[in-house]
Image (cartoon, coloured by chain):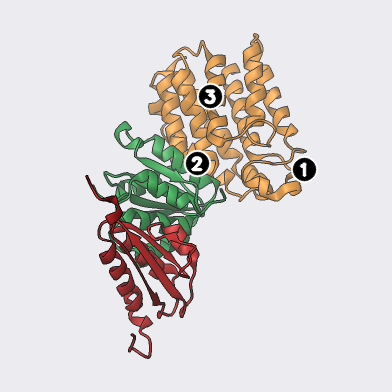
Amino acid sequence: MANVGIVIVSHSPKIAEGAADMVRQMVGDSVNLAYTGGDPGGGLGTGVASIREAIDRAWSEAGVAILVDLGGAETNSEMAVEMLDAERRGRVVVCNAPIVEGAVMAATEASGGSPLETVRRTAEELSPQ
Amino acid sequence: MTPALLHRLILAVADEVIAHADELTELDQAVGDGDHGINMKRGFEAVRADAGATAEKPLPDALKAIGTQLVMKVGGASGPLYGTLFLALSKEIAPDASNLSAAFASAVEAVKSRGKSQPGQKTMLDVLAPVQVALAEGGTDLSVRLPIVAASAADATIPMLATRGRASFLGERSIGHMDPGARSLALIVASVCRALEG
Amino acid sequence: MKDLTATEQATDRAELINAVGLHARPSVKLTQLAKTFECRVEIALSADGPWVDAKSPVKVMRVKAPRGAVLHVRTSGPGAEAAADALMALVRGGFGDQSNQPADLRHG
């Protein structure tokens, strides 16, 4: 089975891109990776449409783990997941982890072929228990 | 609910939000990141542009279309909340709105879930909850009472301490400012009622 | 009946010679390499431990050993020798980063 895909959602397009760069540099190319940042108007913020597109770009049969920064990113990501079709909905998770470190850890775990729940759990190890 | 009435309602709500975008921005600059006005304006401009087509649909489908537009176009923290309100309403409401109170109640629950919040935290829920209570009480003068209930509920958020969302980072500095989502919701309730009266 | 006392095991150690030690990209590479082996793989900064699961990205990242520290590895299960050898080769090779080549390449 393919590796789990990773999606990075930040309020800032620069942070999203930068975090993705770090993941690529540190983990390599063996993981599908997509990022998005900014609201529908192009300012700081998040939006469901661009998150859905990112999920599509990073899609893997093994599922997708989403890393987010502040509140709106989480809520919009949850909405984006709910709007996926039933076949995909159950294979996407939003991780409760710091966005940069979580993305790197999740991608590292994913690059070893771990299943989605393990990828999420690894990212969430970074959060206060 | 006729297409003509639905069309009038959609335009009334959209126009009211768009007209107050600057005020909503100012309110949000005081307690949030200042984008509530811009976000809501963008969302409701999209809703307004589609008003003709939307109004031809049965009420549940129309509400679903509006909810989807809001989710996709508003963004930020309010997009998911307003989107959820309309989408949840669309799932429960009867085409003739005869079960409005029950449908609205379930929509309020959906917003609580989505925002992981409760009334009392200085959010739009502090207007949604009293409006829902008034709807449940019913009566023939609802279209007169609801705007008053909503406006005073929005006013009541002024002295509240924000414990949810971006405003909660301000702590005590959130006190003394109306919650922007409460204001936009009160505007929407008032414009719906006005359009129904007129 | 399988002889359970014959579990393959290995231990070894090597000095961290690369500039950042066990940090950032090197720690990711170490984890990724450990994950390719079926056996248990653990690392520590001393022969007495505490031993950390080398397949866990977060645990390895938290080890934070600087250049010059000695990294111990202990493996058990099928392929344990190969796993220990591979991890030590990674460490001795400075994790493969060109910029991390030590001035003195003689290492024994």
Find disc 3 in the rendering and name its residue: B107
The colour assigned to chain B within the rendered structure: orange
Label 3 packing within 10 angstroms: few (<14), some (14-19), many (20+): many
Image: B176 above or below B185: below
Query: Looking at numbered disc 1 in the image, what kind of residue is underneath it?
Result: Gly
Q: Residue at x 68, y 37 (%)?
A: B122
Locate residue A120, reporting x and y percent. Answer: 42, 47
Secondary structure beneath dot 1 equals: loop
Label 1 packing within 10 angstroms: few (<14), some (14-19), many (20+): some
Chain at tag 1: B
Q: Label 1 to label 2, Cα distance in Å?
A: 27 Å
- Which is closer to the viewer, label 2 or label 3? 2
The colour assigned to chain C within the rendered structure: red
- Which is closer to the viewer, label 3 or label 1? 3
In the drawing, does residue C78 fall left or right of residue B29?
left
Secondary structure beneath dot 3 equals: helix
Label 2 packing within 10 angstroms: few (<14), some (14-19), many (20+): many
In the drawing, does residue C66 fall left or right of residue C29?
right
Mark number for residue A15?
none
Q: Residue at x 75, y 32 (%)?
A: B156
Query: Looking at numbered disc 3 in the image, what kind of residue is underneath it?
Result: Ala
In the rendered image, which quarter contains the N terminus of chain C?
Answer: top left
Secondary structure beneath dot 2 equals: helix
Locate residue A88, reporting x and y percent. Answer: 31, 37
Residue A94 picture quarter: top left
In the rendered image, which quarter contains the C terminus of chain C?
Answer: bottom left
Q: Residue at x 69, y 18 (%)?
A: B145
Find disc 2 in the rendering and name its residue: A75
Q: Label 2 to label 3, Cα distance in Å?
A: 17 Å
Nearest to the observer: residue A109 or residue B137: A109
Image: A100 above or below B139: below
Image: B159 above or below A54: above
